[in-house]
Amino acid sequence: MSSAFQRVRRQSAATSPRPRDYRGSSAFRVALAAGVLAAVVSWLGGQYLVEAQYREESKEIGNYLEGMGSKLSQDLVVSLDHGDLDAALGVIQTQLSRYPGANAAVLDAEGQLLVGPLSTNTWDALRSHKDLGIPGLHRGRLGDTRAVEWHGSIFGRQESLGTLALRLPVPGPVWAGALFNFTAATSLFAAVVAFLYLSSAFRGVAGLRRVLERISQGDYCERAAVVGCSEIKTLIRDTHHALDSFILAGEEAHKVYVETAIALSKTIEAKDRYTSGHSQRVAVYSIEMGNAIGLPPERVETLRLGALLHDIGKVSTPDHVLLKPGALTDEEFELMKKHPMAGDRILSAIPGLRDMADIARSHHEKWDGSGYPMGVSGDSIPLEGRIVAIADAYDALVTKRSYKPAMPVAKALAILEKDAGSHFDPDLVQVFVAMKRNGQGYKPLKKGEASMEAKTKANPQTELKAEAELPNVEPKSVDDASAQETAE
Ligand SMILES: [Fe+2]
């Protein structure tokens, strides 16, 4: 958990500044509003102007039609009175030949065609019929064409001979096409701006939704691209900032947990000046091993904290057992052996420290299954627990205690090698021993002092002598018992 928080902090520190009132999409909004307004105004205004123009044109054409119809009615009387319909049609054609699109017909009292029409097969009625304020005149549409129609009776000497109907098209204003093009262009512009605007907004919402989904899965690393309108950008930035704050708070809480636990662990070590600093040294050795076998940084950090806290369960061990200078009785030893499970319970109860609980529980397990508290063996023991077991025993061997001097490094390494495969993971022992023999972790030699290995090579009896000089001490704690058991 801690490493995830730290990783996110590193990422978010560079990408997620504090929220601010972002107004980058104002230009989008203005352009969109202007485009929509221009399209609406040009459409409504254009329709009004076109209609007004048609109305004026229709009145002029209607006046002309009325005059022409009155004269033509008189010219048709003779032909119709004699029943010469072809002659009547000729009169009409002659009169209207100068008007492209013009049409005319003569209808009887029942509305049936007597003459015409001129340019079409049928005399269809106009749609959207509107009067022009003059009797017999009205305007309307015929398909896509606007037209004006005049109706007037033709009277003979005795009776009505029929009704003359004249129809002339009304030309549209020449600027109507330009207005249509302008309306189409502004509509297209508004549509493009709206598309870009909404696409950006939807991308921002989609990114934010992805972040929330990942949060619900416990992943706080995801960040959304800061795109969309100003509200969405602000929402994304606020979300990022809230996540950063949450991560920071989690880190702080985790830090408090760890420091509290380490302080508690140190109080145990502080009771005995010889074991003071033991956990710190075990942590250093464990980190060296973790790095040597290529553990990722997150696991090395877990290993470090686990090593620092591996003996925290000793808070539950009575002082008369923990601080007893001499050998432990069987009953006392059983009490001491409870500290791995006690550590497991303590660390499992602290959020963010559950990974370390495995290390506390398993650092006294043995490779062959003869350890405690679970008696598991081999790879069933957590890797970090196997590492800390080696570091723990090594530090107990090479440091001075109240009942024994510090064991030479070479001697301690030889003991670890001897117990590889029984007490310790043989591969890890090989790594640790090779690492130490390559120079890591040796205590600085005093001036003029040869290394233990050099001494051993120079005089094989030296190691035997050093071993002989190691007092046959009794363990006073479980860790010392482990070290003693290892040494034996
Ligand atoms: Fe321990």
Image (cartoon, rainbow, N blue to C red):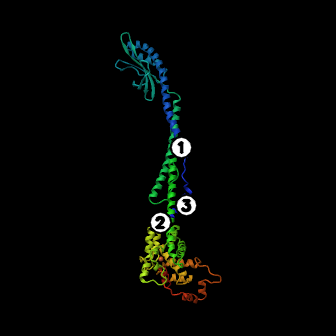
Residue at the spot 51% in from the left edge and 87% down from the top edge: 472
How far apart are labels 1 and 3 at the CA level?
Answer: 34 Å
| Helix, strand or loop for disc 1 | helix
Front in this rendered view, residue 19 or 335: 335
Q: Amino acid at mark 2?
A: Gly
Q: Position of residue 326 (x, y in %)?
A: 48, 84
| Helix, strand or loop for disc 2 | loop
Give the mark, 1 or 2, whose residue is nearer the N terminus: 1
Front in this rendered view, residue 191 or 160: 191
Please identify, in this view, whether the residue under mark 3 or under mark 2 is nearer the observer. 2
Residue 10's label in the rendered image is: 3
Q: Position of residue 129 (x, y in %)?
A: 41, 25
How far apart are labels 1 and 2 at the CA level?
Answer: 46 Å
> For mark 1, what is the residue?
28
Q: Amino acid at mark 3?
A: Arg
In this rendering, is residue 203 above or below 399?
above
Tags 1 and 2 touching, CB below 8 Å: no
Q: Position of residue 56 (x, y in %)?
A: 49, 23
Q: Position of residue 31 (x, y in %)?
A: 54, 41
Task: Estimate how packed mark 2 is, as few (under 14), some (14 to 19) or many (20 or more) residues with alpha carbons within 10 Å.
Answer: some
How far apart are labels 3 and 2 at the CA level?
Answer: 19 Å
Tags 1 and 3 touching, CB below 8 Å: no
> For mark 2, what is the residue?
352
Would residue 234 be seen by someone viewing this image from the given angle?
yes
